[in-house]
Amino acid sequence: MSTSNPATAAFSLARLPLDLRFRRAALVSRERLAPHYVRVRLQGEQLRDFVSLGADDHIRVFFPAAPVETVEEMRASPSREYTPLAWGDDWLDLEFVVHGPHGVAGVWADTAPLGSEAGIGGPRGSMVIEGRPDAWFLAGDETAIPAIRRFCAQMDEDAAGRVVLEVPDAAHEVSIEAPAGVAVEYVHRGAELPGSALIERLEAVGAAERPAGDVFGFVAAEQSVVRSGRALLLDRWGLDAEQIVVKGYWKRDTAEYHAPH
């Protein structure tokens, strides 16, 4: 049961539509941040008016296997959804989890020659935080790192809260910059299934650990984490369903799964 009064809440979540655009850009650089985690930069004139208002925004990125001439050919290429990390006048940064020689996007991010072209569709809309949460609780696996980075960048220097990030082991920890009052902790799943360590950690958080005030809660990882995330934020902490985001960013053995927007 919610303990927040929407009329007096410190913040709210608003959904804003955006004009859906399709753009083309080229891969110009890559940086390995962890053994299986890569940041790439795309660059091109069509990115000059790119905008993403919400930390949890999604764009669809298209990965052609060979050069293509038309938008239709590009849109027919394999594609996946990602959160835009950062952008400027004519560039866009994205981060990818690399699952070895398998899949589409990770292989492209890890091995495509510089100059390779990609297509970018969206975002079609944004969820933005209006106001200032009294505290933050952000949890996810590697796929949620870009969104968590962007939420942390929105925080002021006096922000309070916690970030919980699941990775395989210490060697795979990706640095997250957060204000001093926001604790960042890592949980390691080892050889267990993705989501297992995060679920265990979420289920260990008790009602007494709820921060005071209006808390923004964000949990995103493999689909199996949704139940535990909602049980913590809604049942034990009593947060308002309109002030949290809990979603499966991906689903085991389902490459074409799309996270809900």
Image (cartoon, rainbow, N blue to C red):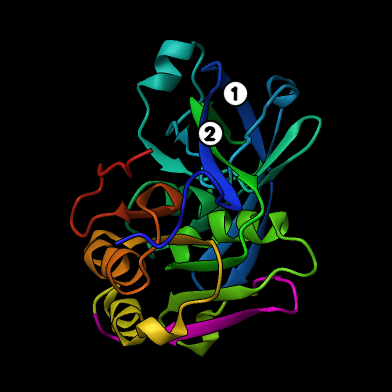
Residue 173 appears in the picture as rendered: yes
Between residues 67 and 155, which one lies in front from this camera angle? 155
Rendered location of residue 58, percent (x, y)? 48, 38
Q: Nearer the viewer, residue 159 or 98?
A: 159
Q: Is residue 174 above or below residue 134?
A: below
Task: Give above or below for 8 relative to 192.
Answer: above
- Label 1 amino acid? Arg
Tell me the quarter of the picture where residue 220 sits: bottom left
Numbered circles on residues, count: 2
Which residue is painted at 53% across and 66% down in the image? Answer: 37
Q: Residue at x 46, y 62 (%)?
A: 217
Where does the magenta region start and end? 176-192
Looking at the picture, how far across and down is residue 171, in whole percent?
A: 53, 86
**Compared to 86, does 35 lie above or below?**
below
Q: Residue at x 39, y 65 (%)?
A: 100
Relative horizontal placement of residue 59, taking residue 203 as reference (left or right)? right
Dot 2 or dot 1, earlier in sequence: 1
Say which residue label 1 marks: 24
Q: Nearer the viewer, residue 260 or 37?
A: 260
For the residue labelled by badge 2, is the local secondary structure a helix, a strand or a loop?
Answer: strand
Task: Place residue 25 in its image quadrant.
Answer: top right
Judging from the image, what secondary structure is the residue with disc 1 in?
A: strand
**Residue 127 among magenta residues:** no
- The residue mark sitting in front, 2 or 1, is 2
Instruction: Using residue 207 as the reference point, say whether residue 225 is left or right of it.
Output: left
Q: Which residue is mark 2?
A: 126
Q: CA distance from mark 2 to mark 1?
A: 21 Å
Which numbered tag is attached to residue 90?
none
The quarter of the image holding the C terminus is top left
Q: Amino acid at mark 2?
A: Ser
- Whether the magenta-drawn stretch holds residue 191 is answered as yes
Where residue 18 sits, quadrant-wise, is: top right
